[in-house]
Amino acid sequence: MTRKKFIILNIVSLFAVFFAAVGIFSLPKNLSSDFDAEIVYPNLINSLDQLSSVVLIDKDSTFTLYLKDNKWVIKERNDFPVDNKKLGELLIKLSRTQKVEPKTSIVDRYARLDLDSLENNKESRVKKIILNDRNGDALVNLAVGKRKFTLGSDEGGTYVLFPDDSQSWLVTGEINPGVRVRDWVDRSLINIPKERIKKITITHPDGEKIFLEKNNLSDEYLTIRNIPKDKEPIRDSITDEIGRTLFNLMFDDVTQSDLINFPRDKTVMAKFETFDGVEIIINFIEENDKNWLKISGSYKNNENANVLTNEEVTPENWSKVIDTLNESSRNWVYQFPGYEVSGIKKRMKDLVTDLENQ
């Protein structure tokens, strides 16, 4: 079996499980029983082996997911890998979509359904989905508007337009294709809860350092080791935000590593050490109001190697996690929302206050 066929079969298997679970051909409960349901894309499942690209368009951006070397990647992000499960979810929704009822065919009324074209209105909320086969022909070409939440099923319905047809339609299900990196990738980089953190060293561009440490795994909080003599922590838990930095760390965007520089005079460096031998190094920079991180790790087995994240992780698995992290970070740097990196931006003044009774 070729790798391409294997990938297609994986996507097909998602369909099979979903069909068995939900009954794809059932209509929402409030539709009349004599309604003649029409599956919008009845041949989509059988055409999956021809699928070569998925184009997603809104007023802000265009995303192209396409097959390269038997892997689904994002063209606009230098071929960063796609999460196949998320692609499968879109294909499932499209395959089970049914026409419910015709709506307006008056162009001036399209905006009420968020279906006015981007050519006529640059601020339109319409989204477009185009699935192309290997010959460049469209398997799916759909303009997607607002949702209707009261259709009678958990998913409701969606207003859509088909090409070369002025008639808009209400169809079953929620069709809301994302047009952001986060919508199409596995966003998780590393997951280490604060309880496993033994030491943290933060070095700011101006040379200020913050040393945090726990003596024992059972200690509740990290302690500031280099606190000035005339200061004390604002509260015992003030270091928690820093300690949680690596817990389920999830990025929003990505770019090639050679496109973002990390000069020493602008870069914050944070080193995290766990009780069980994991070391994570983060380089952080703010550029154009965006938070960019370069991350790497190492692992040295020790007597505390029984690590718990959300489930028990063996030393062998930790080695694989670190290897995967380093492989992905070798060519990429990641953009994070502010709340994910707020901890490592802390300065000493954010953590301490004047000692009482001096």
Image (cartoon, rainbow, N blue to C red):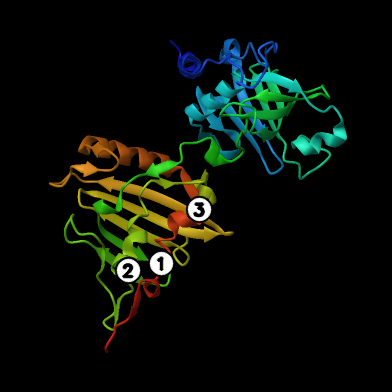
Amino acid found under the numbered disc labelled 3: Pro
Q: Position of residue 302 (x, y in %)?
A: 15, 46
Amino acid found under the numbered disc labelled 2: Ile
Q: Position of residue 155 (x, y in %)?
A: 58, 29
Amino acid found under the numbered disc labelled 1: Lys
Q: Give the side of residue 196 with respect to residue 9, left or right.
A: left
Q: Which residue lies under the disc numbered 3?
A: 337
Picture residue at 54% right of the left edge, 31% below the top: 73
Residue 173: image quadrant is top right
* Numbered tag placed on residue 346 in the rendering: 1
Q: Which residue lies under the disc numbered 2?
A: 210
Q: Position of residue 9 (x, y in %)?
A: 47, 14
Picture residue at 69% right of the left edge, 38% below the top: 58
**Badge 2, how many Cα within 10 Å: few under 14, some, many 20+?**
many
Which residue is more in the foreground, 248 or 260?
248
What's the distance in space between the residues labelled 1 and 3, CA to CA? 16 Å
Are discs 2 and 1 less than 8 Å apart at CB? yes
| Disc 2 versus disc 1: nearer the observer | 1
Residue at the left extreme of this rendering: 303
Picture residue at 45% right of the left edge, 15% below the top: 6
What's the distance in space between the residues labelled 2 and 3, CA to CA? 23 Å
